[in-house]
Image (spheres, rainbow, N blue to C red):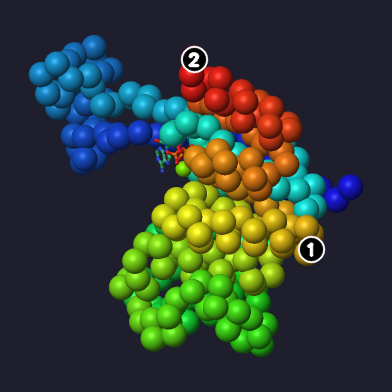
């Protein structure tokens, strides 16, 4: 088998809130008070000292899995479970605190609405920009351009308009079409269906299935739409507080999720 993604003991730690008092001098005074065992001069009443406070938490903890070529893996879990964090690490938008990620081939990412496209550039310019970021030659993008626009169902007069004037649905349609038609071995999609209408959602699921079955592309799909995950994916991961709670056959993983939501 051809392993496309191999994740080992992946962990990501985030720091929360404001750390420090906002100026170095105030921080030094706070540290000094702390060393002398005096109250921190810069805390407000009933507030803990901000100095040396550890507002850290693990958004992902010890996550390991493998994805084979052509596999469609669904990643599910409640809000804040760590799904987007995982996809951002796989897309190299953020780095892990611990652990390793091995990826074979190019990754096309469709992360939460708002990433990937530049608002001031037109739809056309964004298609070329995204293609270039994926390492594609202009000729390859030229060849796919009409198909991309047709799939997105963006009216021709809008393609030369800055994407900041698009509705969220139009934006996602175009972003999805770019990721689906430009060649990358791995396609990563986070909540892309959420703002599309039902007809477009079905079209996207059909397209992802098609590129995985016919072109052998690997798909990592995050969604709160259980039906869509069931329709598209063969395997699944259930994340809970940054850890893998279930991993395996998608039916089993969805079942475990539904049970945990009720419990
Ligand atoms: N840049 C950041 N700095 C600090 N904490 C963050 C950051 N990004 C995410 N987090 C935290 O990490 C945790 C996991 O967030 P993540 O976005 O991965 O969840 P998710 O599973 O995608 O949730 P949702 O279903 O709501 O999209 C959350 O508690 C979130 O608040
Ligand atoms: Mg998310």
Residue to which mark 2 is pinned:
263
Name the secondary structure under disc 1. helix
Say left or right for 173 vs 188. Answer: left
Q: Which mark is residue 128?
A: none
* Vertical side of 64 occupied by 176: above or below: below
* Secondary structure category for the residue under label 2: loop
Determine the CA span between mark 1 and mark 2: 40 Å
**Residue pointed to by mark 1:** 214
Q: Is residue 224 above or below residue 173?
A: above
Horizontal placement of 236 versus 122: left or right?
right
**Residue drawn at point x = 40 percent, y = 34 percent:** 15
Q: Residue at image x 50%, y 59%?
A: 199
**What residue lies at 35% left-to-right and 71% top-to-bottom?**
166
N-terminal of the two: label 1 or label 2? 1
Q: Position of residue 89 (x, y in %)?
A: 57, 47
Going by the picture, which residue comes out furthest to the left?
Answer: 45
Regarding residue 164, the answer to whether it shows in the image is: yes
Disc 1 CB within 8 Å of nearest ligand 2 atom: no
**30 with respect to 256 (left or right):** left
Question: Where's residue 49, x and y in %?
Answer: 23, 22
Return the residue found at the far front.
199
From the viewer's side, name the closer residue of 40 and 142.
142
Q: Nearer the viewer, residue 242 or 203?
A: 203
Q: Position of residue 108 (x, y in %)?
A: 61, 62
Q: Is residue 192 above or below residue 7?
A: below
Query: Above or below — where is 176 with respect to 139?
Result: above
Q: Nearer the viewer, residue 104 or 48?
A: 104
Q: Residue at x 56, y 73 (%)?
A: 151
Residue 161 picture location, percent across and down? 36, 82
Q: Is ligand 1 closer than 8 angstroms to the Cβ of mark 2?
A: no
- Crowding around mark 1 (Cα neighbors within 10 Å: few <14, some 14 to 19, many 20+) is few
């Amino acid at each position: 088998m051809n392993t496309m993604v191999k994740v080992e003991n992946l962990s990501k730690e985030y720091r929360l809130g404001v750390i420090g008092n906002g100026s170095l001098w105030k921080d030094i005074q706070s540290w000094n008070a702390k060393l002398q065992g005096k109250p921190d001069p810069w805390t407000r009443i009933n507030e803990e000292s901000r100095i040396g406070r550890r507002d850290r938490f693990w958004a992902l903890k010890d996550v390991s899995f493998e994805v084979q070529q052509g596999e469609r893996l669904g990643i599910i879990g409640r809000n804040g479970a760590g799904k987007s964090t995982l996809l951002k690490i796989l897309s190299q938008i953020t780095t892990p605190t611990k652990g390793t990620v091995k990826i074979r081939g190019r990754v096309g990412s469709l992360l939460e609405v708002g990433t990937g496209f530049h608002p001031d550039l037109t739809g056309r310019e964004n298609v070329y920009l995204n293609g270039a970021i994926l390492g594609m030659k202009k000729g390859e993008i030229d060849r796919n351009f009409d198909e991309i626009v047709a799939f997105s169902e963006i009216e021709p007069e809008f393609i030369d308009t800055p994407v900041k004037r698009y509705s969220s649905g139009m934006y996602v349609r175009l972003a999805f079409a770019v990721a689906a038609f430009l060649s990358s071995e791995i396609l990563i999609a986070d909540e892309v269906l959420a703002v599309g209408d039902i007809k477009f959602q079905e079209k996207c699921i059909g397209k992802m299935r098609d590129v995985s079955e016919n072109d052998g592309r690997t798909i990592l799909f995050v969604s709160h739409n259980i039906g869509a995950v069931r329709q598209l994916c063969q395997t699944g991961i259930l994340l809970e507080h940054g850890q893998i709670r279930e991993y395996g056959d998608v039916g089993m993983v969805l079942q475990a999720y539904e049970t945990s939501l009720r419990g």
